[in-house]
Amino acid sequence: MIEVELPDGSKLEMEENSTVEDVAYKIGEGLGNDTKAGKINGKLVAKEETVSDGDKIHIVTPSSEEYLEVLRHSAAHVFAQALKRIHPEAKLTIGPSTDEGFYYDVADVELEQEDLREIEEEMEKIIEEDLEIEQEFVSRDEAEKFFEDNLYKRQILEEEAGGTDKVSFYEQGEFKDLCKGPHVDSTGEIGGFKLLNIAGAYWRGDEENEMLTRVYGTAFADESDLEEFLELREEAQKRDHRKIGKEMNLFSIPEVTGPGLPLYHPNGQTVISELRGFVDNMNKDQGYDFVETPHLFRTELWKESGHYENYRDDMFLLEVGDEEYGLKPMNCPGHATIFKQQSWSYKDLPVRYAENGKVYRKEQRGELSGLSRVWSFTIDDAHLFVRPDQIKQEILQIMENIEKVLETFNMEAEYFLATRPDKSVGSDEIWNESEDALREVLEELDLEYGVEEGDGAFYGPKIDVAFEDALGREWDGPTVQLDFNMPERFDLTYTGENNEDQRPVMIHRALYGSYERFMMVLIEQFEGSFPTWLAPEQVRILPVSDDSLEYAREVREKLDGFRVEVEDRSWTVGKKIQNAHDEKVPYMLIVGDDEEENRTVSVRDRFENEESDVPIEEFGTHLAEEVADKRLEPDFIE
């Protein structure tokens, strides 16, 4: 007999070689009948998977959060079956589920967007056939023979099946594919699906390999859920930061400059500068000192910090003479080196260094996407060197700053405690102490948080904060990381009260995460209609005719200190208003003979509210208050 642990912590005795499904039936017949899959020690597995002594077991049913992942994996198989019916020559590779649906990478077949409808029709037939989806195990020899004309599947067999004698397949009707599962019981369980788009993807994400065709899709148990998803997706496409970024002339990523290397245009850099000023002012108020480190370091520094060992595959490395250098993937080793250049007393701590530091990380080309995933980005970085007795207070202050960022941009957030990853440095004692310190802060602040097992940095655990945007999507944002390891590796010390060398604790923190990711979130959150304090152009003055141009320029001078432009093209007032509205300018000031005579302006905001005969000084006073208060919307006209 063996013993397994259930989600409530209770223990259940089972016979050896029992499966997840057996566990479910032991709990109750109804649960057994509803079981679609399971989780063993946090890993999603087929219900036929054998459990072992001490395993933590979670049963997956149609009401479980994980069920959608199982169903979408099955939908990927339905797509593959439909494709093979239409294009028998197609070579299948991998088809996993994703957060939004699934994809399948295929070779030896040319597909265009218009081909998706035919495949969808065949998928509908397969779902109507309600084919049973059954797992079977075959010998390696049989598997290799089955895929004798598919080098991709043979490579998967070699890499993932290892030396096992039996290999897992799933079969539905005439279709059979190499797969560990899990899957739903039959194709008829898929209630609603949609093939979304086609893209290119390198085999195994390696640019040296062949380019495959990737087909994205989504699936749900219910058609109404699919409709809701498609509506949200349409709204997301309207808000796509790449589209709006081009329309508003914010940034570009030209092919000629290289992938994942964004260029900020004047409009985009204006937004970035305002964001930078916001956090820089917070840093100044709280005693941070500003430092600057180069983009490039000798790899000896990265070896000392541990990055070379744990992060080398994600670094850009180059030879300079007989020496190897690396573009910095993080700012922390530079800050630790600055701290080491002088002697410190316990009275000097905490020491807080801040830098808007550019870093470089070598993501796979296929994973790059607009500003959300790039090679080059800037972190609003800070590193604090503190005594152990100062840890809690400093982290509480950082969390307060994060809350201020969230409130300023009216964002919801979720909090996560990320624990020790497999690749890490430092002792168990140090890691346990670090994780406990962060957990204590989260609980003192009464914040609900999830635990992301194994998702910490290689040098320490962290609190991750995920932004939730206007569409309910989550994006990585601020982070607070506690690090007992890097001070050890760099031999950082301060003189304690007892005149002996003591080891400081290092805290890594970012309030936005990266400017690029945060910029992307803001563009999509506000759909390009930035709050007035962030807007590249805050006010546009629209003279009704060329005769009013001189007065328009006079008004602009009175609003000195704000970002104000005069529309001097010989257009109709209606066209000028429409153009300013399309370019999402918060305020338009319309001036003509009457306004010039009365020394006033007519104010119109981007919501089409209007107010006539407004003294220039009155509008200027309000504008200054609106910008200083960082209000989310133009509110001169209530």
Image: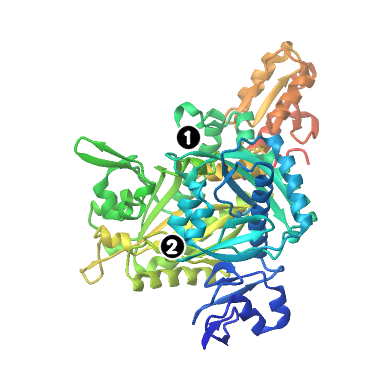
Please tell me whether residue 277 is drawn above or below residue 140 in the rendered image.
above
- Vertical order, 159 against 592 (above or below): below
* Residue 479 visible, this angle: yes
Label 2 sits on residue? 394
Quarter holding the C terminus is top right
User: Mark 2 Cα within 10 Å, few/some/many (few <14, many 20+)?
Assistant: some
Give the Cα distance between marks 1 and 2. Answer: 38 Å
Question: Looking at the picture, how far across and down is residue 149, in whole percent?
Answer: 52, 46
Towards the viewer: 223 or 485: 223
* Image: 239 above or below 451: above
List the residue tagged with mark 1.
259
**Percent position (x, y) of residue 9?**
57, 82
Q: Nearer the viewer, residue 67 or 309?
A: 67
Which colour style is shown?
A: rainbow
Q: Is residue 179 left or right of residue 526?
A: left
Instruction: Residue type at mark 1: give it.
Output: Pro
Q: What kind of residue is marked 2?
A: Glu
Of the residues under marks 1 and 2, which one precedes in the sequence?
1
436 relative position to 126: left or right = left
